[in-house]
Image (cartoon, rainbow, N blue to C red):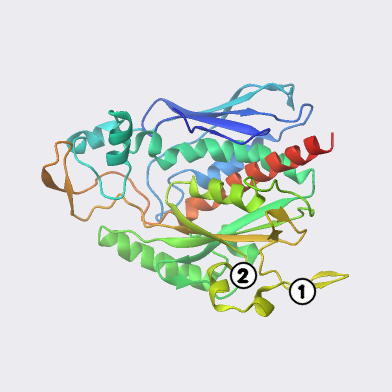
């Protein structure tokens, strides 16, 4: 399937479907001789896996990663790394009764129109289950970035209409919403549970911060750093928008307000979000993505079947009432993949 490969030098290709035997990824362009921390890779997968709390899908997947190539005696060889995660709790039969109905908000209709055939077991290739492979690859990229002094952290800043009032990075992994404000997280969780009880779902906003990126990363004019980050984020299922720095608030600012004044010590503000002209400034990279409400809901909805006849549908199965908590590590993974690729592209430029 075209479109399953991402990156230029540090490149990944993912494979697998939601209710197929497995999902996985092949990573090309990994620096040879690097000792990989396999436990750290598993920890990232554990942050994304289903069944973490009452606020996520109750599908039980251990997401235990197996590395089949590219690693010898704990070190990367420079050969492609193949990572696979076997699906242990797939239940395709749950979709048998609605296999001829299009689920509102899903890619059922568009996949059928594009390919003339679709995998109706869950979301098939369009399912967020595919992002487990991205997180596995991103965990490798994160370890390479750590050697460069680069850190990536994301968190929920808004969900169910509740916004965080402070940013405390120490509490992100201490609440099921992965929010940066414990008080707001409690109210978010309440709103999510209310939506679930109604057979509905809620959306939110995830913010990501990258520290340690030096100035000069990015490839104008079409491979700008922010353009590649934007493509990476929009490729994540459920992401419907992105903004950098001041973002859409810039529409109500003047140039004198939005411009980041410069001093010998650095930038006074960071309305640009750490990127100017598609190239990193050395300041913290900051962006936010919008996560739509989960499309799979138990409430009855109007739809049509594959023959175009009107129908109603209730989507049964195990689904997240809010995608933000499990999307946080996916946002971090895709960010890491983009950054490592651009570091390698920058090195090639000066080779």
Instruction: Look at the image and tell me whether residue 332 can be seen.
Output: no
Q: How many marks?
A: 2
Tell me which numbered mark, 2 or 1, is placed earlier along the sequence.
2
Instruction: Look at the image and tell me whether residue 83 can be seen.
Output: yes
In this rendering, the answer to whether 48 lies above or below 263 is above
Res 167 label: 2
Q: Residues within 10 Å of mark 1 (few under 14, many from 20)?
A: few
Badge 1 marks a residue whose secondary structure is: loop
Residue drawn at 53 percent across, 49 percent down: 233
Q: Position of residue 9 (x, y in %)?
A: 68, 32
In this rendering, the answer to whether 203 lies above or below 136 is below
Q: Left or right: 343 with respect to 44?
A: right
Q: Residues within 10 Å of mark 2 (few under 14, many from 20)?
A: some
Res 261 label: 1
Q: Left or right: 223 with respect to 87?
A: right
Res 137 label: none
Q: Left or right: 178 with respect to 11?
A: left
Q: Position of residue 182 (x, y in %)?
A: 54, 69
């Amino acid at each position: 399937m075209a479109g399953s490969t991402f990156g230029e030098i540090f490149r990944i290709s993912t494979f697998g479907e939601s209710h197929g035997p497995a999902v996985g990824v092949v990573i090309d362009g990994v620096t040879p001789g690097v000792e990989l921390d396999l436990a750290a890779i598993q920890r990232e997968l554990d942050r994304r896996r289903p069944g973490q709390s009452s606020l996520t899908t109750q599908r039980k997947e251990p997401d235990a990663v197996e590395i089949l190539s590219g690693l010898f005696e704990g070190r990367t060889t420079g050969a492609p790394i193949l990572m696979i995660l076997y699906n242990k709790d797939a239940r395709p039969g749950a979709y048998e009764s609605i296999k001829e109905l299009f689920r509102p908000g899903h890619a059922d209709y568009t996949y059928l129109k594009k390919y003339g055939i679709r995998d109706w077991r869950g979301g098939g290739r369009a399912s967020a289950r595919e992002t487990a492979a991205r997180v596995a690859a991103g965990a490798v990229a994160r370890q390479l970035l750590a050697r460069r002094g680069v850190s990536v952290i994301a968190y929920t800043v808004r969900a169910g209409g509740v916004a965080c009032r402070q940013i405390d990075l120490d509490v992100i992994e201490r609440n099921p919403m992965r929010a940066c404000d414990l008080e707001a997280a409690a109210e978010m969780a309440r709103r999510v549970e209310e939506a679930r009880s109604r057979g509905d779902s809620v959306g939110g906003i995830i913010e990501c911060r990258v520290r340690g990126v030096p100035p000069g990363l990015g490839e104008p004019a079409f491979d700008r750093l922010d353009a590649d980050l934007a493509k990476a984020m929009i490729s994540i299922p459920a992401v419907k928008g992105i903004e950098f720095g001041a973002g859409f608030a810039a529409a109500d600012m003047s140039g004198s307000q939005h411009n980041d004044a410069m001093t010998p010590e650095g930038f006074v503000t960071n309305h640009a979000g750490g990127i100017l002209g598609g190239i990193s400034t050395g300041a913290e990279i900051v962006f936010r993505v919008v996560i739509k409400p989960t499309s799979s809901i138990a409430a009855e909805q109007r739809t049509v079947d594959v023959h175009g006849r009107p129908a109603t549908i209730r989507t049964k199965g195990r689904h997240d009432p809010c995608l933000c908590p499990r999307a946080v590590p996916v946002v971090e993974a895709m960010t890491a993949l983009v950054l490592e690729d651009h570091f390698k592209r920058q090195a090639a430029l000066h080779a």
